[in-house]
Image (tube, grey):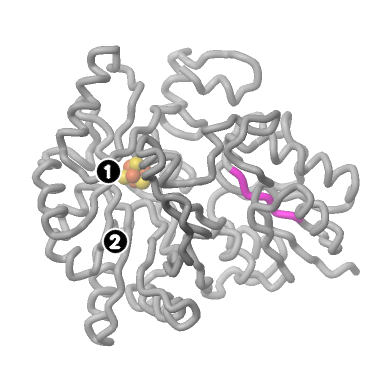
Amino acid sequence: MTQNKLLLTSIFGPYGISDEYAEGAGMQMELLNNQITREQGIHSPRQSYWSFGLYLLAINISVPAAVLDFPLWDDFTKELKQGYTHIGISFIVPNVYKVKRMTEYIRTHYPGMKIILGGYGTIIPNLDEIVSYDELCKGEGVMWLRDYFGEPTDVPVKHPVLNGPAYESIYGFSSKPKGSVLLTGLGCNNGCVFCITTHQFKKKYIPLLETGKDIFQACQNAKMELGSSGFTIMDENFLKIPLRARQLLKEMQTQKRPYVFDIFSSAEVIQEVGVDFLVRLGVRMIWVGVESKINSHAKTKGIDLKKLFNKLQSNGIVVIASAILFQDHHDPETIQDEIDWVISLGSNLVQFMNYTPFPTTALYDGLKKEGRLKKCGLQISEWRR
Ligand code: SF4
């Protein structure tokens, strides 16, 4: 019997260019320069992050697994020669034509290789008409892969030591990134109608690091291996479990080992835990969804966001406020009001996103029911209202 061997890969580069596989600016593989500091032009820091999930998957299954992160096409075809029985490709929606090219190549040259697709790209409703694949991994991948390969699923999940960002530079000068990334959990139970994260995990939160002690240990491991003392926590709503954050602070105090963190959290939990707690926890930057003044969500109801941001920032915590444009109530006048409102909150940085009805979300279902999704070509284009 052939021994299973798994290649886990992200989609191939180059990125941020307009060609038959990609859409140009919307495909840019950068967080800051793409979403937050694009308008700052030459003054924008430049950095990019690894495909963290692949490393988590690779160390949590017994099947021999290799990770190929953001390869060029030649790297990808060269690696395939290493005798894999399975390939797992992680992708997001705009990269679907890159996946199509990769899978066509595999079917032609390695017809026996099983193709597993994962990541947010798997929400495309007619994916099987675009891409040839054997399995779709939706939701949390470690348990899915263990189950698929017939391995025990009750083994604790190990956290990889993750360096991040992959590179960083400003004004053309590079520095060696010393930070690290923590994957503390997936999903969010707030259930905002437009949010793909909450719907991908069925409005549930799936912890990967369950206790504050687990998080502290992951920090210690990264400190030992990489010398990291600053961490980006990739968790859509980290403070939603205040107990775990409190345990983490207690552990740092007991061990006399402080770390600093960049986090994402919704306003109601920031209010609940309080700014003083965040300062003591070592929060350096916080990313908050304010979304809209008029179409407000439960997470911001009754909260004086301006006051909250002012308090966070006057205590040294950088705030990124995230808002959504092109909602139902937006016309040329109201959209400007909304932009002015977000700016008036006074956060250090602002992100504006498009109100996009991604399949699987309540927003998509609602618009579909009302017959308000446009039909034009492939179904992925229908999501444009
Ligand atoms: S709070 Fe944020 S992560 Fe949670 S459902 Fe709302 S938008 Fe999504």
Secondary structure mostly seen in magenta is strand
Residue at 86% across / 59% down in the picture? 81
Secondary structure of residue under mark 1 = strand
Q: Quadrant of residue 347?
A: top left
For badge 1, the amino acid type reads Leu
Compared to 198, does 339 lie above or below?
above
Q: What is the x, y in percent for residue 249?
A: 24, 74
Decide: marks 1, 2 in contact (CB < 8 A)? no
Q: Position of residue 221 (x, y in %)?
A: 46, 80
**Magenta extent:** 87-91
Q: Residues within 10 Å of mark 2 (few under 14, many from 20)?
A: some
Q: Picture coordinates of residue 17 (x, y %)? A: 61, 35
Residue displayed at 48% across by 66% down:
176
Quadrant location of residue 317? Answer: bottom left
Kind of element beneath mark 2: loop
- Counting residues from the start of the chain, the first of labels 1 and 2 encountered is 2
Q: Is residue 12 left or right of residue 259?
A: right
- Between label 1 and label 2, give the one nearer the viewer: 1
Name which residue lies at 19% across and 48% down. Answer: 268
Which residue is at 19% across, 63% downward?
278
Label ID, residue 241:
2
Q: Nearer the viewer, residue 196 or 31?
A: 31
